Amino acid sequence: QGQLVESGGGLVQPGGSLNLSCAASRSITTMYNIDWYRQASGKQREFVARSLFEDNADYAASVTGRFTVSRDNARNTIYLHMNMLRPEDTAVYYCHWQDWWGQGTQVTVSS
């Protein structure tokens, strides 16, 4: 069983930026459709973004234009670049691929 390990969460003011990382325990060259999800307190987990393959990506409507995904195959890492953050972006962010889930990283947007 492989692993996904997220990092990069923290506290940021509204309008600020954060970059999350998801490190895989194997090569991501053939890992298509690596997803980012988030779960706010008391709410269901929701889809945020998908790294389809290379530079192709898909996004939830709520983050389109503000978040972007990228991948570094040499580092076996997928990134979620978050800009113009809002208080409603506060959640635990998870990386997901097939039946692999990371442990999550907390993002808090507050002044």
Image (cartoon, rainbow, N blue to C red):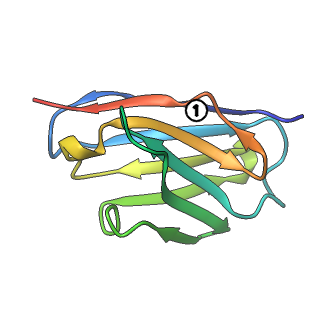
| Position in image of residue 11 (x %, y %) | 27, 26
28 lies above or below 57: above
| Position in image of residue 31 (x %, y %) | 79, 58
Q: Which residue is mark 1?
A: 6
Residue toward you, 32 or 43: 43
Is residue 102 found left or right of 59 in the rendered image? right
> Which residue appears at 84% of the width and 61% of the height?
30
Residue toward you, 107 or 39: 39
Outermost residue toward the left in this view: 111
Q: Quadrant of residue 103?
A: top right
| Position in image of residue 95 (x %, y %) | 60, 43
> Which residue appears at 57% of the width and 62% of the height?
50
Mark 1 neighbour class, 10 Å CA radius: few under 14, some 14 to 19, many 20 or more: many
> Which residue appears at 55% of the width and 70% of the height?
57
Residue toward you, 22 or 43: 43
Q: Quadrant of residue 25?
A: top right
Q: Given the image, on which type of amino acid does mark 1 rest?
A: Glu
| Position in image of residue 40 (x %, y %) | 37, 38
Is residue 65 found left or right of 46 in the rendered image? left
> Which residue appears at 48% of the width and 49% of the height?
80
